[in-house]
């Protein structure tokens, strides 16, 4: 203690060390740098990444291993054009009509035949001025190779010796069967789903091999080993005659349109003109039609059956429009398909 100028001063030693306070208040714990929830989230994220990578590797492996089988069953061969249930092949070389037919048959296909005007219109978009052989021939009238008459179009003929049919982007043209032209083959996509096993199809030998609608078998030949083999089967290679009592799997064919219909009837392009015929002139063969009166001359449909009705009846209707595009493979020289 010092006394100066009537002032009393006290000197206290001050420690430079921090003093520990006796604080009775509850102390807040310091959180670790990564809480447990964060650690769990990080672990789950890493596991998720690993799982996704495994799935990706497996997907790539499956695509590589199944690419060939998927291509075989779901689509046309490479460089082919696909439309609906068919594949189309445009040749680059030229042959006469009979050699062109043999080429197509060797490939389990046939020279192009049109099922309707829409298919014809769609194919015309891929053609130019050059003519291609198709499966049309003049045998007591112009007929397709399956025996059905030409009705969807007329054909231009300049000579009586022009007995085989060709096509370009403008029209059908009769030509000498010995002329050398490129050709178009048509192949059913169904065959690409089949393997070596045989399946029953709607083909039977009744005074000749015929489909269940009565039309003759013309698009292919059938292998028969015995006269008692009266029913037809198919695998990926060919048609085979078999005993009708044999136990085989089978293939059914059903129109997708019926799944959209209910009990209400809709007008379709079917009319009774000396027999029930479609608007392109072809006869009704795929089904029977129910008729309750001779004045019912027009055809309608619901989910159950075809029904004849008076053409003056007021019904909704169904239109059919040609497709706007075709699925294609890689193109070469401007043509959509190559074998």
Image: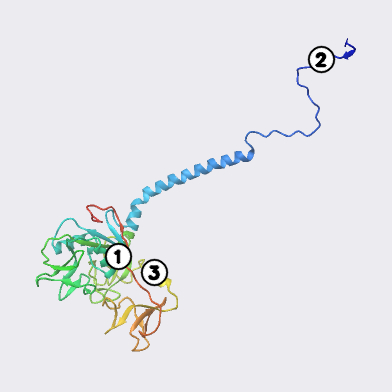
Residue position marked by numbered label 2 in the rendering: 13
Q: CA distance from mark 2 to mark 1?
A: 112 Å
Return the mark for residue 234.
1
Q: What secondary structure is marked by label 2?
A: loop
Residue 123 locus on image (x, y percent): 25, 63
The nearer-to-camera label among 3 and 2 is 2
Does residue 168 lie above or below 9 as drawn? below
Secondary structure under tag 3 reads helix
Q: Which residue in the structure is indicated by mark 3?
A: 256
Check if mark 1's residue and mark 3's residue have beta carbons within 8 Å.
no
- Would residue 240 be visible to someone looking at this image? no
Query: Split into 4 quadrants, where in the image is the N terminus?
Result: top right
Vertical position of residue 18 compared to residue 301: above or below: above
Question: Is 234 displayed left or right of 104 in the figure?
Answer: right
Q: Nearer the viewer, residue 126 or 133?
A: 126
Q: Quadrant of residue 251?
A: bottom left
Q: Quadrant of the C terminus?
A: bottom left
Of badges 2 and 1, nearer the viewer stands 2
Q: In this rendering, would 268 be left or right of 3?
A: left
Which SS class for mark 1? strand
Q: Nearer the viewer, residue 255 or 219?
A: 255
Q: Which mark is residue 157?
A: none
């Amino acid at each position: 203690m010092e006394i100066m100028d009537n002032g009393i001063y006290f000197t206290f030693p001050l420690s430079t060390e921090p003093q520990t306070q006796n604080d009775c208040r509850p102390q807040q714990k310091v959180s670790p740098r990564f809480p447990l929830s964060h650690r769990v989230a990080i672990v789950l994220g890493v596991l998720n990444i690993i799982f996704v990578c495994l799935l990706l590797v497996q997907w790539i492996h499956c695509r590589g291993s199944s690419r060939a089988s998927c291509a075989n069953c779901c689509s046309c061969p490479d460089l082919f054009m696909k439309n609906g249930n068919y594949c189309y092949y445009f040749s680059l070389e030229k042959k006469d009509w009979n050699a062109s037919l043999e080429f197509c048959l060797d490939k389990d296909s046939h020279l192009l035949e049109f099922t309707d005007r829409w298919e014809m219109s769609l194919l015309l978009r891929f053609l130019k001025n050059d003519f291609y052989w198709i499966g049309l021939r003049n045998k007591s009238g112009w007929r397709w190779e399956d025996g059905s008459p030409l009705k969807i179009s007329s054909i231009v003929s300049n000579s009586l010796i022009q007995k085989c049919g060709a096509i370009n982007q403008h029209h059908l043209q009769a030509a000498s069967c010995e002329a050398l032209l490129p050709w178009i083959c048509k192949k059913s996509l169904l065959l690409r789903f089949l393997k070596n096993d045989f399946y029953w199809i709607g083909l039977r030998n009744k005074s000749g091999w015929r489909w269940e609608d009565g039309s003759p078998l013309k698009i292919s030949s059938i292998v028969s080993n015995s006269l008692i083999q009266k029913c037809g089967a198919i695998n990926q290679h060919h048609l085979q005659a078999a005993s009708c009592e044999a136990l085989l799997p089978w293939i059914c064919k059903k129109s997708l349109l019926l799944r959209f219909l209910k009990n209400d009837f809709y007008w379709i392009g079917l009319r009774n003109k000396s027999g029930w015929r479609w608007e392109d002139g072809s006869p009704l063969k795929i089904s029977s039609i129910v008729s309750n009166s001779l004045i019912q001359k027009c055809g309608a449909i619901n989910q159950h059956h075809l029904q004849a009705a008076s053409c003056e009846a007021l019904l909704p209707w169904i239109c059919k429009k040609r497709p706007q595009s075709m699925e294609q493979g890689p193109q070469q020289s401007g043509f959509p398909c190559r074998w």
